[in-house]
Image: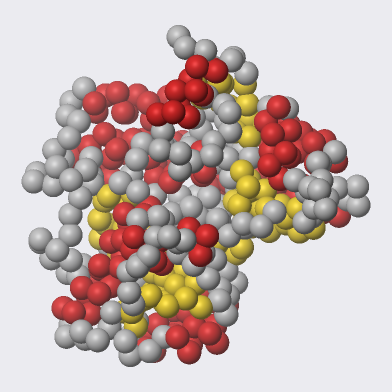
């Protein structure tokens, strides 16, 4: 086997260079831990950006993948396959939605929502309804349509011209949304928590207000639940906390425990929005991906993951609030819900150096937004593991390197 140094050299010279990963080569994973090619073990409090919701290499999921791979790997959309049909029915049974479209990622799911919105209004003769209203700070993916929805210029530099017909308004600002939604608006799309912008939750009155605006004006309401869905906040889908049901939502990340998969869930009035020939995905509804997704749902039930995400999330929120209250620690705020939480650091903290220090102490975390540490561990993390990780974060944060003035 190649050494870690050789692997990192090969990655640097073979990759496109669009990523900036830490100098760690993951070799194996089990539960909430990763082991690298040097034999070091890490407590993963990122869960692969909220993807490995049931932990790394969960035996129920890996067995389902292996079993299905031995039956049929791929069928395309020319034929049905049993796992995709079963998964669609299971997802419908767990949510307020009536129909499901399967794809391969969150970005693909959000691209589908754009087409769905415009095609729905076209079908009903409202051809002027083509505009989409999104929010500043929002993140919806990096393909061209999803990138246009994304409300952060950082990702758009040099990428224009982007898709037309998209307006952005401040997040959590109902007045701005009221002014932006007109008779030409096809849909409004928001995240229930802006995870990439720094774990910024939507107020429940804001979500209720969006529903009222859309119902009054005839625009569709879409929630991007790519990162917040699948138990991440303690509810199966995070919009359940508010009682607001959107017309459709996008899903991905935790849906298949790391096997690439995405979905769009819609209510019945949108069932005919994309008739045959208007949209497709060669790999969407892949039987192996759907077998993994079915196994994930089994784990949710067997391990009572929603309850665990709620209780561990409360413990995490309490611990982060204590860090903010500690004058010895350079933390200024904490926010989030369930097992999607952010710790805001003082402006002079060198976050890159802090993440290196945490990694050297065996804990993996991610940086998002401006000076925010994001916690998104597996939903089956134990109390002992969470305490262990938070103890390391507290210790390293107390000696956090400060950026030069």
> What residue lies at 16% left-to-right and 78% top-to-bottom?
123
Q: Position of residue 127 (x, y in %)?
A: 20, 84
Question: Residue 334, located in which quarter of the rendered image?
Answer: bottom right
- Residue nearer the viewer, 393 or 269: 393
Q: Kindly give the residue lying farthest to the top in the view shown.
A: 1
Q: Kindly give the residue lying farthest to the right in the view shown.
A: 327
- Residue 313 position (above or below residue 389): below
Image quarter of the N terminus:
top left
> What residue lies at 58% left-to-right and 40% top-to-bottom?
46
Q: Is residue 100 left or right of residue 371?
A: left
Q: Position of residue 317 (x, y in %)?
A: 71, 52
- Residue 157 position (above or below residue 73): below
The tally of labels here is 0
Q: Is residue 142 left or right of residue 196?
A: left
Q: Is residue 117 left or right of residue 205?
A: left
> What residue lies at 17% left-to-right and 69% top-to-bottom?
272
Q: Is residue 93 visible?
A: no
> What residue lies at 55% left-to-right and 76% top-to-bottom?
170
- In the rendered view, how is the structure colored? secondary structure
Q: Is residue 358 left or right of residue 16?
A: right
- Residue 292 position (above or below residue 146): above
Q: Is residue 120 visible?
A: yes
- Residue nearer the viewer, 391 or 381: 391
Q: Position of residue 307 (x, y in %)?
A: 57, 46
């Amino acid at each position: 086997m190649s050494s870690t140094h050789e692997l990192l050299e090969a990655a640097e010279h073979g990759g496109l260079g669009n990523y900036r990963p830490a100098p760690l080569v993951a070799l194996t994973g089990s539960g909430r831990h990763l082991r690298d090619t040097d034999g070091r073990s890490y407590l993963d409090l990122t869960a692969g950006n909220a993807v490995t919701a049931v932990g790394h290499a969960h035996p129920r999921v890996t067995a389902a993948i292996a079993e299905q791979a031995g039956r049929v790997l791929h069928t395309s959309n020319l034929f049905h396959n049993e796992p995709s049909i079963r998964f669609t029915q299971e997802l419908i049974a767990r949510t307020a939605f009536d129909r499901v479209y399967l794809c391969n990622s969150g970005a693909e799911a959000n691209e589908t929502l754009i087409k769905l919105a415009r095609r729905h209004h076209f079908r009903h003769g409202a051809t002027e309804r083509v505009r989409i209203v999104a929010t500043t700070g929002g993140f919806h993916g990096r393909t061209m349509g999803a990138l246009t929805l994304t409300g952060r210029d950082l990702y758009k530099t040099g990428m224009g011209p982007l898709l037309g017909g998209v307006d952005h308004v401040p997040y959590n600002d109902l007045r701005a949304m009221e002014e932006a939604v007109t008779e030409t608006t096809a849909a409004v799309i928001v995240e229930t928590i802006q995870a990439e912008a720094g774990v910024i939750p939507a107020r429940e009155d804001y979500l209720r207000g969006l529903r009222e605006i859309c119902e009054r004006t005839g625009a569709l309401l879409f929630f991007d639940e790519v990162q917040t869905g699948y138990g991440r906040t303690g509810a199966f889908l995070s919009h359940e906390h508010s009682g607001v049901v959107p017309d459709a939502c996008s899903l991905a990340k935790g849906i298949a425990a790391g096997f690439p998969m995405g979905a769009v869930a819609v209510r019945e009035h949108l069932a005919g929005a994309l008739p045959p020939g208007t949209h497709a995905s060669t790999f969407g509804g892949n039987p192996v991906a759907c077998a993994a997704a079915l196994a994930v749902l089994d784990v949710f039930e067997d391990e009572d993951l929603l309850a665990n995400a709620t209780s561990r999330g409360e413990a995490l929120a309490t611990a982060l609030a204590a860090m903010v209250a500690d004058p010895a620690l350079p933390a200024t705020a904490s926010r989030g819900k369930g097992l999607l939480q952010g710790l805001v650091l003082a402006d002079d903290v060198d976050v890159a150096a802090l993440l290196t220090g945490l990694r050297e102490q065996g804990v993996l975390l991610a940086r998002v937004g401006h000076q925010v540490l994001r916690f998104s561990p597996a939903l089956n993390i134990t109390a002992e593991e969470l305490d262990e990780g938070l103890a390391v974060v507290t210790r390293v944060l107390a000696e956090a390197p400060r950026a030069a003035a």
